[in-house]
Structure formats: C-alpha cells, structure tokens
Image (cartoon, grey):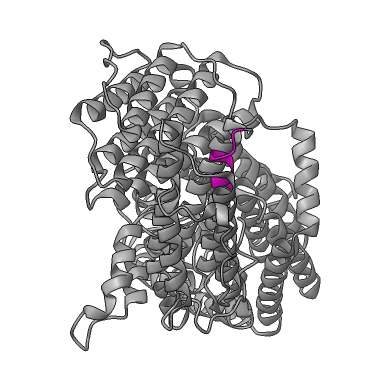
C-alpha cells in the first residue's frame, strides 16, 4: 500500500539481454515466446537480503500482533502499513542515506494520507483533489530517487485515504503509519554506531575488486562484462560517497581518503583500457596487488609489502604501474590529491536550484501531466461507475505509471500477471485462515519474502505484496474473500488506463531513447579528448569527464535493457542499436588508450588533430540525435598524419559512422522523436 517500489537493479541481466538482442532471431520453434516477453518475465539474479527480510518480518508482523492482542487490529494494520512503506524505502547502504530514504517519503506519505482522509466520500471533490496531487507528485518524481519515492508515496497514501475509512481524529491514521516507519527505521539504524562508514568502505573495496577483474580480462573476450561490472560498482560507490557528503558536507579525513581512493580507481580503469586496446593482458602480479589493495580498503589496513616498480618501457604498462603505486600510496595516507569530484553546495542553494529546474523542466511537466491524466480518468471512472473499494484502480495506476522504474508497458503486464497470482494466494489465506491472531504468522512469512522477491522483479514483487495488502486492508474494511474478484477487475482496469492514457497517447513512449543517451556519451568523449590533449586543461576536469562517460555508458545500457522489454516495434528498434553501442564503446576505449599512452611517454597528437577528432565525435553525436546522415568536418592539413596517437580512434569513429549511416542502421525510420528528452537524466 504505502510502499516505495524499488527500481530494478541496474545492470541485472544486461549482458544476457544484449546477447539475446543479437541472436534472438536464431531461436527455432514456432511456440517460442517473443524475446521481449522473455526478457520481461526473466527473474533478476542477486544475493538474498537476509537482514532486510528479518526487518520486514518484524516491522510488519509485530504491530499487527500487538493490535490483535489489544483488540484493535485496525490500528495495528495502519502501523504495519507504515512499516511496509519503510521496508521499501530501505534501499541505501550508508546509514545517513537510510534516514533520508526511509523517513522523507513516509513523512510525505503521511501528509498524503491526511489529505485523502479529508476528502473520503466527497465524490467529485475527491477527484479534483487527487488530480491536483497527481500533478505535484508526478513533477517532483523527476528530481531524484528520494523525490521519486516521495511523490509516489504522496499519491499512494492520498488515494488510500480517499478510498478507505480511517479512524478519527484525522491525525490518528498518519501518526500510526509514522509509528510503523519509526519502528523499521530504528531497526535499520541499530548497527550504525558499530558500522559507521563500513558500507562506504565496502563499496570502494568492491570497485577495486571489480577493477582487478577488469585488469585480468584485458585482451580477452570477458572484457565487456568486466567493464560493465566496473561501471556499476563505480556508480554505486560514487552515489554512496557523494550522497553522504550531500547530507553531511563537513570535511572528514576518513571520507576524504575514501574519495581519494575511489578517484584512484579511475586511473586503474584508464590504464586497463590502454592495455586492452593493444590486445594484451596484464601480469598476474599487478592483478594480485590490486586485489590486496581492495582487501586493505575493506579491512581499513595497508597491505604488507610493496610492489617493486616495474622496469617497463611500454606506455600502457607504465600507466598500470603508476596507477597501482598511486592507489597504494593513497591507501597508506600519503595523498594530496585535489577533490576531483567536487563538493556539494549548501542545502538551501541545492533546494532552490532544484525548485527552479523543476518548474522549467519539460520532462517534469510532461510526466506530471501524464500521471494527472491517468489518475483523473481513474477517479472519474470509479466516481461514475459502482466499483466496490474503488481506491484499487488509481492505486494500480500510481504503481504502474513510473517510467523511472522501467518500461511502463512491461510494468502493466507484470502488474496484471502478478496480481492474478497474488489473488490466488490471497484467496486461500482469506478463505481458510481465521481473521485475527492466525493471520499474524501468515503476514510474517509474506513480509519476510517481500524484500527477497522484490529484487527478482516487479511481477514477483506484485505477487507477494498483493495478498499482504489485501490482508491488511481486510482488517480495515472487513470484506473477506469477496474482495478478490473486484480487485482483479480493478487491477486490469488500472493497467488498461495506463496503457491507453499513459502510453499509447504519448508518442514518446513508442520510441527508444538509446540513441540520445549514446549521443551524450559520444559528446562527453569529445570533451575528454579535448581535456586529455590540452596541456592547459585541468586534470580534475579530465577525471570528472571520464567519470561522466562511465555514467553515460551505464545509462545507455539501462535504457537499452528497458527498451528490449517493450513490444514491437520499440523493442526491435532498440535491438538494432546494439552493434552501434559496441562500436561507441570501442571509440571510448581507443580514445582513453590514446590519452593514457600520451600521458606516459607516447608522442601526443597535434592540437589541430585533437580538435578535429573532437569535432568528428560531435558530428557523430548529432547524427545519432537527429537520425540524419551528416559528414564529419574536413580534416585540416595539420591533422593528416596517419600514424598519430588518434589513428585508432579515427578508425573506430569511421566504423561507427558507417554503421549508423548504413541501410540497416538503427536510426532508420526513427527520426528524432524523444531524443532530446532522454539526452540527460
């Protein structure tokens, strides 16, 4: 009910999905399901979150048990609802971020519950109120992860308050839900005094371990998989460290060292890329040393022994040795590097900037209007048609219409399938389990399964949360097994409203944004080339640009995987981009390798050659955005040397352009619809 549904884990199944896109047509058999459906139904792999399962079981079942024991099961259900929302919000590793992720959305949700309760039973007045709340919730959902969760909870709780009778006085229900939130929050923070900064340290260590795997994969067929894993771990570590600095921006020697260690990973990644570009491998000693550094970061110690400086002459090998030496020195505390990632501004400044961006952002208005239209249609429908407990229709709309949580079409399909499966479970429980104390152990089991299955996919999450919600709502509404069939109909109506009013009527839904995100990566590569070969440029700017490129690649693969789950023609168009994605990654790798070799002794290209290369990359990016063929800029005479440092980059850019402009290029027939919208996230 009041949960914040987690975004699908980034990167899960990406390499598999990419391979499926390449050879999906090779599958034989007329009865084989379509590829987009297979990808949609596939379970995401991942570890079992045992601690989260225990917190969910205790946080949701304990209040219900107390309510049953004191004869007030309705109040116990409201506390459990608040705990349920907190369980979904407990997605961060760093403890300071947990406070934000759990508390802020639930406080906003309590406000929504009060607004909804105020309009309970008021008919068209409730329709107007929920439509206005939908616009606000949709717009703030585009700001960031916490804002997205807050917007979702605001609308969800307003819908529930307007659809279910709440106990008097008006403040009692919101306070009971916040009590459940507080219970889960306290359990989540119990280990904070003993484990402060451990999640951040583990995240940085994981980045070093992934980089060691990347070094070991240089020159082999495992390179792409290893590079994608490095991207994920770097994104996670930077989000964790920068998120903590945004919450507590005061200077800390321990946090500064972790940031410096994370910056050092970038040097190792660049060096590994340079070695891979030469189709060579890295020595086992160097890989083992990086793993020792990872163990040292994780344990908070400095590894024994010192790697002797390698007597090498190749620039790429020198880059590897220098990056390892720098990382070891940083771990030992002998670092004086500048803060390359920058520090967050003051909180009032960030809030003011976010508010300005929100009001002028076309994306926020567009999503807000989509959500407003769908909620308005849903509420108008249930106000004119006799639908029992009609809150379930707008509730379904709110859950499904979350583009930042993945494909809207796929979520609608999974919502329908998951609800059907969940109703079967709920029917058995409501029919054969007596109401009251016997329901507590059932809720305990379902609550424990919730964090586990939520990470497997949205359909699995829906299948387990449906019976859980129905049990809690039955304690408030006392409908029993009679509510099962209406709930299925309501869910199907809600999914249909989203597919028509929130998907089909918006042409941007039919087009993939892979090309736009890929163009952003190419543009940032052009900036990287300019920084790398300009002696006057700030090296911190080069590091930030390189970090941005890796974030771009993550966005490209996320959008690609999301688009593969769309039905034809969107899914087929997305699959056509895969060869170009690989080509652009080769462009980025060769550009990085050229910069690394130049920094470690190789002759640099002329300024004219570097400027021309950056212009070529920008022309390529423009072609990706518009879908139109455009010739690159004419090469100046000073950039004619066929053996300069950028020769390999130039060859890969030509290959990518040929692929883009060819008769089977991904841009064929797509135009630029939706490209600009997805350029920056």
Q: In this orientation, does residue 57 appear?
A: no
Percent position (x, y) of residue 507? 62, 80
**Quadrant of the image occupied by residue 281:** top left
* Quarter of the picture holding the N terminus: bottom right
Asked if the stretch drawn in magenta spans residue 15, the answer is: no
Q: Is residue 177 left or right of residue 659?
A: right
Camera-side residue: 467 or 634? 634
Percent position (x, y) of residue 195? 44, 21
Residue at x 49%, y 15% (from the top left corner):
335
Percent position (x, y) of residue 191? 44, 23
Q: Is residue 408 left or right of residue 134?
A: left
Asked if the stretch drawn in magenta spans residue 528, the answer is: yes
Q: Is residue 113 left or right of residue 306?
A: right
75 over 427 or under it: above or below: above
Q: Main secondary structure of the magenta part?
A: helix
Please report the bounds of the magenta region as a residue range. 527-535
Residue at x 49%, y 82% (from the top left corner):
668
């Amino acid at each position: 009910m009041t949960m914040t549904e987690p975004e699908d884990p980034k990167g899960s199944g990406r390499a598999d999905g990419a391979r499926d896109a390449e050879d999906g047509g090779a599958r034989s058999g007329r009865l084989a399901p379509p590829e987009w459906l297979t990808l949609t139904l596939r379970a995401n792999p991942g570890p079992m979150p045992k601690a989260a399962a225990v917190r969910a079981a205790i946080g949701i079942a304990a209040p219900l048990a107390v309510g049953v024991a004191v004869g007030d099961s309705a109040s116990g259900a409201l506390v459990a609802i608040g705990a349920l929302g907190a369980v979904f919000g407990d997605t961060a590793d760093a403890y300071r971020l947990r406070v934000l992720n759990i508390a802020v959305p639930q406080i906003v949700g309590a406000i929504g519950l009060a607004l909804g309760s105020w309009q309970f039973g008021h008919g068209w007045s409730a329709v107007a109120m929920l439509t206005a709340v939908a616009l606000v919730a949709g717009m703030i959902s585009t700001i960031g992860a916490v804002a997205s969760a807050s917007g979702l909870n605001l609308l969800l709780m307003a819908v529930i308050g307007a659809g279910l009778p709440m106990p008097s006085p008006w403040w009692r229900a919101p306070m009971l839900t916040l009590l459940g939130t507080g219970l889960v929050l306290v359990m989540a923070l119990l280990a904070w005094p003993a484990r402060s900064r451990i999640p951040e340290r583990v995240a940085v260590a994981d980045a070093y371990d992934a980089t060691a795997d990347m070094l070991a994969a240089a020159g082999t067929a495992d390179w792409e998989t290893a590079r994608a894993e490095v991207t994920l771990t770097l994104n996670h570590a930077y989000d964790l460290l920068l998120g903590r600095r945004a919450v507590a921006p005061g200077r800390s020697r321990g946090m500064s060292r972790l940031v410096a260690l994370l910056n050092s990973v970038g040097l190792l990644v660049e060096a590994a890329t340079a070695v891979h570009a030469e189709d060579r491998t890295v020595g086992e000693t160097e890989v083992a040393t990086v793993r020792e550094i990872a163990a040292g970061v994780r344990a908070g110690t400095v590894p024994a022994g010192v790697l002797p400086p390698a007597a090498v002459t190749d620039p790429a090998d020198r880059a590897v040795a220098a990056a390892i030496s720098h990382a070891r020195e940083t771990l030992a505390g002998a670092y004086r590097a500048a803060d390359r990632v920058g520090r967050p501004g003051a909180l009032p400044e960030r809030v003011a900037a976010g508010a300005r961006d929100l009001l002028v952002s076309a994306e926020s208005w567009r999503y807000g209007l989509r959500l407003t239209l769908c909620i308005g249609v849903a509420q108008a429908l249930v106000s004119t048609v006799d639908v029992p407990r009609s809150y379930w229709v707008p509730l379904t709309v709110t859950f499904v219409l979350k583009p930042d949580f993945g494909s809207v079409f796929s979520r609608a399909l999974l919502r329908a399938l998951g609800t059907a499966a969940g109703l079967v479970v709920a029917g058995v429980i409501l029919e054969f389990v007596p109401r009251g104390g016997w329901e507590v152990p059932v809720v305990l089991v379902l609550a424990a399964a919730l964090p586990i299955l939520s990470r497997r996919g949205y359909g699995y999450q829906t299948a387990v949360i449906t019976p859980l919600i129905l049990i809690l709502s039955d304690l408030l509404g006392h409908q029993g097994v009679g509510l099962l069939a209406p709930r299925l109909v309501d869910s199907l109506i809600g999914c249909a409203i989203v597919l028509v009013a929130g998907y089909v009527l918006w042409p941007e839904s039919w087009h993939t944004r892979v090309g736009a995100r890929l163009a952003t990566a190419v543009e940032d590569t052009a900036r990287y080339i300019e920084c790398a070969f300009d002696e006057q440029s700030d090296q911190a700017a080069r590091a930030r640009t390189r970090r941005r490129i890796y974030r771009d690649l993550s966005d490209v693969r996320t959008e690609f995987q999301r688009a593969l789950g769309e039905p034809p023609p969107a899914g087929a168009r997305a699959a056509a981009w895969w060869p170009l994605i690989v080509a652009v990654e080769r462009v980025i790798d060769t550009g990085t390798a050229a910069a690394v070799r130049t920094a470690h002794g190789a002759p640099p290209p002329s300024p004219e050659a570097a400027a021309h290369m950056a212009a070529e990359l920008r022309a390529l990016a423009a072609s990706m955005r518009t879908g139109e063929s455009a010739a690159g800029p004419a090469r100046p005479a000073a950039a004619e040397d066929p053996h300069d440092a950028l020769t390999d980059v130039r060859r890969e850019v030509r290959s990518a352009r040929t692929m883009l402009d060819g008769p089977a290029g991904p841009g064929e027939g797509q135009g630029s619809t939706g490209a600009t919208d997805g350029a920056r996230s």
